[in-house]
Image (cartoon, rainbow, N blue to C red):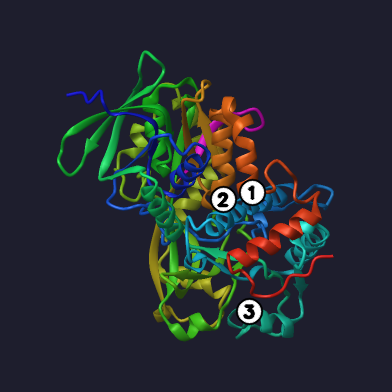
Amino acid sequence: MSNRGNKTDVILIGAGIMSATLGTFLKELVPDWEIKVFEKLENAGEESSNEWNNAGTGHAALCELNYTTEKPDGSIDISKAIKINEQFQLSTQFWSYLVNHELIKNPEDFIRPLPHMSMVQGDKNVAFLKKRFEALSNNPLFQGMEFSDAPAKLMEWIPLIMQGRPSNEVIAATKIDSGTDVNFSALTHMLFDHLQNKNVDIKYKHSVDNMKRASDGSWELKVHNIESGSIEHHNAKFVFIGGGGGSLHLLQKSGIPEGKHIGGFPVSGIFMACNNPEIIAQHHAKVYGKAKVGAPPMSVPHLDTRYIDNKKSLLFGPFAGFSPKFLKTGSMFDLLTSVKPHNVLTMLAAGVKEMSLTKYLIQQVMLTKEQRMEELREFIPNAKSEDWDLVVAGQRVQVIKDTVEGGKGTLQFGTEVVSAADGSIAALLGASPGASTAVHVMLEVINKCFPQHMIDWEPKIKEMIPSYGVSLMENPELLHEIHTLTAETLALREKELVYS
């Protein structure tokens, strides 16, 4: 059975934050394009964008120590932190545009102001944090950051973390009040409600089983209606694969050469969630520590205040877990079936290189709750086991590919866009900072896949994102203006920021 009438301009696979963002952009840029969305689950934002599956930090490199590295000469490289901060600023500008134009309402339902902090222990780490603070606080993007190694000041900032510590412990922290907590699930729902109002056809419980090129260069998709069991055929000029961990299999099915020699390695996360309201009330910040020696960058321990369903919660983690599934709702054969003749050597090379990661994951999987509590007590010395529950977070599939710098089978920690040379299909792979930089990543997709439209679209993009194509770091006045406007529109004024 072939429904040849099912032709459309754009198909988005997966109803997460990425498809929601791309769909919203395209509806603003070309309102008359027809868009269809296929999601195998019964609701939007249920997998990688779900608030329990996603760490929820508005990743702006304000507190994540793995985005600033120490060079051999002892100086601090802040280039990655600058890049990620500027990318997050694109997100807040776009969200402000949507609120100002009443395309979405009640920003406090998805974003709230929350201090972002880094905390370290020991002389060597404190020296590193101080150098990092000096390097960042000279930069307009990170203005307002404070540093302290004074126990009295730290007790004021993080009482829960400071209680019960020996008075002679060497400890320091940085704090910046312009951080945020973002509920990407709530935002995803808002964006899909908006798209539905704009006549975007969103089909839940529809799984894309296969795809192939049609003779005219468009894409034929074989779609399984999970509820009725029937098979539908849909055709689109442009396809975006935004299915989280499920994207790799679909990219492989597309057969595009750009999807070859790429593998995926799944890592699951486990958090401890506090169930005691009295403890939750004592902490108000996202506090990031330093990853242990030998631990991968995604395992940076952090104690996060989160707002989930408008209720304050407290999470600690992540502890790494391992499952061969590429999605929480995926199959135990996901990893095995992702190995193909074209990527088997890449995958094997990564396996040999990443023995320390494999060892780390095995150790993490074997941890008992009490051993996890011991790690938590490095943050909260007085933590009691009965106040904390284990929560299994989402699956993240780290990209494995051959790179010039890393050679064959290099594990990538980050977010990657893979697109066909003709721009007719793009897939999003990878993990953190993911959702926080969704706007930047989707602008990259638009640039790569629709170069012929960019001259016409650029004025509208600049209307939505005033800093588009401009470095905010090099334009402190524009940065100040944008900060003031987004803070007002998104109700992010917890404390006045002073810009010099």
Q: Which residue position holds label 1?
A: 87
Look at the numbered discs 2 and 1 and tell me whether their residues touch, using CB distance below 8 Å.
yes
Q: Give the percent coordinates (x, y) of residue 467.
A: 70, 48
Look at the numbered discs 1 and 3 and tell me whether their residues touch, using CB distance below 8 Å.
no
Q: Earlier in the sequence, mark 3 or mark 2?
A: 3
Crowd tier of the residue under label 1, counting other residues whose Cα lies within 10 Å: few below 14, some 14–19, many 20 or above: many
Using residue 70 as the reference point, say whether residue 454 is left or right of it: left
Where is residue 206, by image quadrant? top left
Q: Could you tell me which secondary element the residue under label 3 belongs to?
A: loop
Q: Quadrant of the N terminus?
A: top left
Q: Could you tell me which secondary element the residue under label 1 belongs to?
A: helix
Using residue 456 as the reference point, say whether residue 45 is left or right of it: left
Q: Nearer the viewer, residue 470 or 309?
A: 470
Kind of residue at badge 3: Ile
Q: Nearer the viewer, mark 2 or mark 1?
A: 1
Q: Could you tell me which secondary element the residue under label 2 belongs to?
A: loop
Q: Which residue appears at 54% of the width and 28% of the height? A: 450
Kind of residue at badge 2: Pro
Q: Which residue position holds label 2?
A: 433
Q: Main secondary structure of the magenta part?
A: strand
Q: Earlier in the sequence, mark 2 or mark 1?
A: 1
Image: magenta residue range: 397-407
Residue 85 visible somewhere in the drawing: yes
Crowd tier of the residue under label 3, counting other residues whose Cα lies within 10 Å: few below 14, some 14–19, many 20 or above: many
Q: From what the image shows, is residue 228 above or below residue 337?
A: below
Q: Which residue position holds label 3?
A: 158
Is 139 one of the magenta-colored residues? no
Work out how far the residue at label 1 is from the one at label 3, CA to CA, in angstroms. 28 Å
